[in-house]
Image (tube, rainbow, N blue to C red):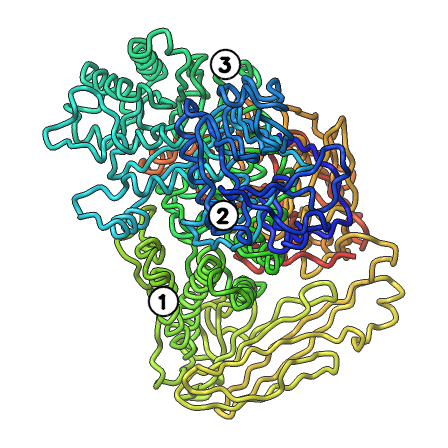
Amino acid sequence: MLIGNTALIAGLGLSFLGQVFSLGEERVISFPTLSELEGRESYDHFIENQIGQVPFYSSRNEKKTSHQEHFVLASKHHKHATPLLLDSKDDQAIHVAAQTFAEDVHKVTGQRPRLYNDTLPHSIERALIVGSINSDLVKNVKGVKRDELEGKWESYSIGWEEQPLKGLKEGLIITGSDRRGTIYALYTLSEQMGISPWYFWTDTPVRPKDIVAFNRTKKLNHGEPTVKYRGLFINDEHPALWGWAQQHWNRDPWETAFQVEMYEKWFEMMLRLKSNYHWPAMWASMFDVDGLDISNGMPKIPTPGPNQVLANKMGVVMGTSHHEPMSRNKPEWDSFGVGKWDYNENKDTLTEFWKYGAERAKGMETLFTLGMRGDGDEPLSGASNALVQNITNAQLGLLDDVYGDGSDKISKMWCMYKEVAGYYMNGLEVPDDVTVLFADDNYGNLMSVLPTDKQDHKAGAGIYYHVDYVGFPRDYKWTNTINLAKTWEQMNHARSFNTTSIWILNVGSLKPLEMPSEHFLALAYDSDAWPRNSVGKFLRAWAEREFGEEVAEETASIMSKYSLYAGRGKAELINGTTFSLTNYEEAERVLAGWNDLVVRAGKVYEKLDKATKPSFFQQVYMLCAGQANLNRLHIAVGRSHLYAFQARTAANEFAKEAIEAFYNDANITETFHSMLNRKWDHMWDQVHVNYYGALEPIRDSLPAVKFVNPYLPSRPGIPIKEHALPGYVAYLRVTAENFVGAWPGDTGKNCDALFKCPDPTLLTMDPYGAKTRWIDIGSGGPKDTKFTLKTDHDWLKISESKGQVKWDGSDDTRIYISINWDKVKIPKDFKENNEIYKTEGHVLIKGNDRTNVTITVPIEVPPSPPSDFKGHIQGDGYLVIEAAHFTRRSSKDGYAFEEIEGYGRTLSGVEMLPSSTQNFTVGQGPELEYDFWTHGDNGKNAKNVEVIVQIGPTNNFIVGKELAFGIQLDDQSPKEIHPIPTLLLTDNVNEEPFKRSAVGAVPSDWENAVSSENRNATLSFKLDDSWKSSGKHTVKLYGMTTGIVFERIWIDFGGIKERGYSYLGPPESVRV
């Protein structure tokens, strides 16, 4: 909780150009000019004494003007930096952070403050007093409100005080409730001075300032963080982070890559981000051992290794991952364990192994992982609730033995990961002093929150969350595919259900996941600072800090769109058939969206100074360029296959484009690796192109592409149509929207009859559907070929009437067909009877190769809705409604539907909030109403309409409860919908055994839901006679439980089903 005590200042003319905010916190640091400091004649100059003090002082009773508000921390003009006073007995971590803070001041101003312990030289009159609330130093400081900090967790206070200690005229008091509270206070000031927490990891430059000052009129306090333990987990670190570290620190292949040099940078970054808890890399590392001499085995006396000592020295709480109990990781067992990883068979050995870890961690701030999974993070063979409870109780006994009476102060957690979550659902008993760590489903969807009947669980509960994953259905390790709005929505539930003892994030190799990692930690540190729809605010603050105020707004906008686009699906799951090449111009729209981000990011990049460009490249530009290029590659692969089937020579062009994109992918990676004298070499080595299964292949490879023989013309195929010209060959190919086939000739997919098919008839057009249909005219043989197009009605418009295609397929033409509805002459009786008028037009395509294809264009003109109608209008045989575009909404008992901007795959999501266990009876909760207009002929033959409610891929995360919503069409009875299957995938006997064992206690439809980032609730409603006439109808959505996020509603009268597959579905229908 951020607590501000601010005097409002107006009209002071202070210079805040280039200001850098500590994200989410009030600004207390400024960069005044020399003239602003001088202010009045009596302060025209600084009088420096022998040790560089700046005696700039005014009476508290005198009204302060602009220059009197500044407590100067450092001034380049005066070669001055205000010294720091610390308590020699304060925790070592505070002294480490103070040294780093002094270095930060030097980076910004060129002036390095001196550090003193306990006392200052008599001549010093101003200082920064730094210490924890219980230190002897701070106990003697005037003006410290001890009751606001004593007994609190990681809280701090920063404020100016007159005569805080004997001999000082003034001072800046920086104090924390404990060691990390004090550290966070220092690093908050550093960030506001212009030091990004990521300065090493993203090369964010430090922007020099001549003067840095604290505003005397302000005070910055921060209470206890939302979440007690906020952590990062290095995981899946091969090949990227490991390969980079190995080269960066010149490690030999047999050496561990991660040692104190890297962890110094890592822990500093964590603390700057207000993180306090770490799970170290464990694929090939032994964090607590690496750096020790183990040539003769492990030390007989348990001895913490250099990494473990460093973490404690810097103030970081250490743990081990979800499946590595008792502060010992898997490689330690692989190297020094004896026998099977089986408690029943090898109990004594395992007990001694775990005891060693507990003894080694004495004196090191540690949060112990308990429990037991199988060897290598697999399910435990023969596991039962009784077995794992016995194991955990034995581990607690070991902690009692090692720590004695102090064992109750030792933090402990038990992670409910994959199948262990199933044990919890079936009554697993977790001791009251052990935090229950729930996991997400590895794809960012919570599996559980702390149940309401266990809210008094003493150690509370937490969340293990992922922005990186190795496993089924697909690894995602290459790039940022995180939708920030979804992260907020899921963690809001965790916070609402008091699941806030631990939040830890699997960040893989970290890069390029810095931004979503910081967002997660920001929510964990101060959830109140980031309420619903705060993603834009976060991105603007982040972009301003990282790249500067001038480009912050545009950068935030780019990354907001990036979050939406990237969150549609994992990059490793995208392939040549993901986006439709025939329906809704989906592939074109997706690629255009990505290309637009690349262009925009490129313009921002060009505006930046040389020092900032590397940071922007790696945090923004290469992410956009990499995703755009990968989508281009896969769409080109898909086109090469489709066009080869259609006998279009353009298949070769797109095969070559796929090859070009494949090499461009490598070039983007190499550009990053070669920056800054190859500082980040290997950091983007991650395989991501052309997976063969769930786990990453050994190398990227080009997906199969198809070529056609460009020197052969297109022949009509077998069987030959009646009356066809004998020996006729074509050099043109005509294809049409919503069709896989091609003309002239038969492909086997030109019509339902397969062969001897007529020329194509487009799907019916109307004034409220898509504005155009397209046809492609392309090369079908080794001759440049001219063509003409002619329509038979003046209302039938074509984008081009003639053209020429090149023989090699490089200049195929897309023709757009549209309707001038004002020129469609509707007979009087149709108007008078309020009926739908139907007719058709034709587009005749002729080529100088004798190609002759007639495109039939059916149209229908329904009566217009009344002028006062507000809502969506049926077009193309369906309606698509974005959930946020409701006509009306109503609340109930303090619950209401609220929009979550940027959630989902197309626009946003709408969810019933606040999050709680509230369960309304269907039809009794808050409502969303959507009015829509239909044209009347839907019910003449059809008896039912299909309504598809698209929701986010959430799970039934409230233990013992099924998430639900209600839906009602017109005055039909409301339906109660439970969209998430209760059958678990692991219990589905129809699934393959590997899949059942690999995924844990997830719903049976989980694979499809997480692969598409979407779940469809498909319903059928009866149509009565009222649907035979045009008119208004209403669909209502009723809130029943929290957790259901509506994205879109499809009302399909056959138009969607007729068109077939698309990933995202149609664009939204016309809305008036």
Within 10 Å of the Cα at label 2, are there few (<14), some (14-19), or many (20+) other Cα atoms? many
Q: Is residue 1039 left or right of residue 487?
A: right
* 2 or 1: tag closer to the N-terminus: 2
Q: Are marks 2 and 3 in contact (CB under 8 Å)?
A: no
Residue appearing at x 63%, y 67% in the figure: 763
Q: Is residue 457 above or below residue 3?
A: above
Q: Is residue 690 left or right of residue 343?
A: right
Residue furthest out toward the right: 832
Which one is in front, 1009 or 288?
A: 288
Residue type for callout 2? Ser
Q: Is residue 394 above or below residue 931?
A: above
Residue type for callout 3? Lys
Residue 157 x/y as whole percent: 59, 29
Say if residue 245 shows up in the picture.
Answer: yes
Q: Disc 3 marks which residue?
A: 458
Say if residue 881 shows up in the picture.
Answer: no
Residue 868 x/y as whole percent: 88, 55
Mark 3: secondary structure = loop
Q: Disc 2 marks which residue?
A: 196
Residue appearing at x 51%, y 44% in the figure: 52
Residue 914 x/y as whole percent: 67, 30
**C-alpha span from label 2 to label 1:** 28 Å
* 2 or 3: tag closer to the N-terminus: 2
Q: Disc 1 marks which residue?
A: 667
